Image (cartoon, grey):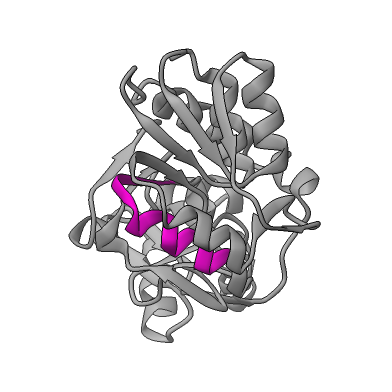
Amino acid sequence: MLTQERYQSILNIINEKNAVTVSELAQLLNTSESTIRRDLTALDEMGKLRKVFGGATALRQNSGTFEDSVSSREKRMSEEKTHIAEYCANLINSSDFVYIDSGSTTSRLIDFIEEKKATYVTNGITHARKLIQKGLNTYIIGGKIKPVTEAVVGAEAISNLKKLNFSKAFMGTNGIDLKSGFTTPDIEEAMMKEAAIERTYMPFVISDHTKFRQVYSVTFSQLRKCCIITDRLPDRTFEKETIIKEVMR
């Protein structure tokens, strides 16, 4: 394989996976690790990727306003979401007043909740259904329903949310970036997320690793305000900005 062809193959793999190790690239491209290290150094100097210890990560990706449906997002990174959800469910205590944000990973969290004495509040239509089917003490925020994400949003929803004080919140996100913070494509959903975080003693953002270095249109929080629970980090630079728990490391 010619050098330029190998460069392009490396970039294609990293853009798809968001982060990759030297050994993974060497195996996928059937070449030596020393060659891959030289390639990563060259691509990093060209500004095509970010070289990190043991591998490389994609540069920050600006994803704009596009947002997939709930059903399509639920199928992605299924194993990773399950590990994250199981860990988060064990963080809930009997005295907790819990906010559960709409989203595919937060929906998976509900599958593993066993604490019956806690109280749960959500702005997710499907989330509320799943909570009551488990016999949990559940409230749903009132307001306008956004069809794509099946989330309750809008001024009335925010007004209702601001009357509550949560001990813990489990928040979803579309993007996580060192500079832009936590981002989402929709202004109204961003306002809901921001309000929930401000009303919470211990806010957690739960997300698989593919959301790192993704940037969407609206920032709803800086990284330092929340603890991130993820399957793994693309690199260690994010640890300087917030508390992070990796559940599959």
When asked about the image quadrant of residue 45, the answer is: bottom left
**Farthest residue, direction left:** 240
Seen in the picture, residue 196 relative to 204 is either above or below; the reply is: below
What's drawn in magenta, residue-wise?
A: 189-205
- Left or right: where 18 falls relative to 129: left
Any magenta on residue 181? no
Of residues 103 and 41, the one nearer the viewer is: 103
Across and down, in percent, residue 227 comes to: 30, 48
Residue visible at 43% across and 64% down? Answer: 194
Across and down, in percent, residue 84 comes to: 46, 32
Of residues 133 and 25, the one nearer the viewer is: 133
When asked about the image quadrant of residue 46, the answer is: bottom left
Across and down, in percent, residue 81 comes to: 55, 35
When asked about the image quadrant of residue 76, the answer is: top right
Of residues 237 and 22, the one nearer the viewer is: 237
The number of callouts visible is: 0
Across and down, in percent, residue 184 comes to: 56, 67
Residue visible at 63% across and 66% down? Answer: 154
Residue visible at 34% across and 77% down? Answer: 179
- Left or right: where 33 falls relative to 236: right
Residue visible at 48% across and 49% down? Answer: 209
**Farthest residue, direction bottom:** 46
Of residues 237 and 144, the one nearer the viewer is: 144
Quadrant containing the C terminus in the rendered view: top left
Seen in the picture, residue 16 relative to 127 is either above or below; the reply is: below
Residue 10 visible from this viewpoint: no
Seen in the picture, residue 222 relative to 28 is either above or below; the reply is: below
- Left or right: where 134 falls relative to 137: right
Quadrant containing the N terminus in the rendered view: bottom right
Residue 159 visible from this viewpoint: yes
Any magenta on residue 193? yes
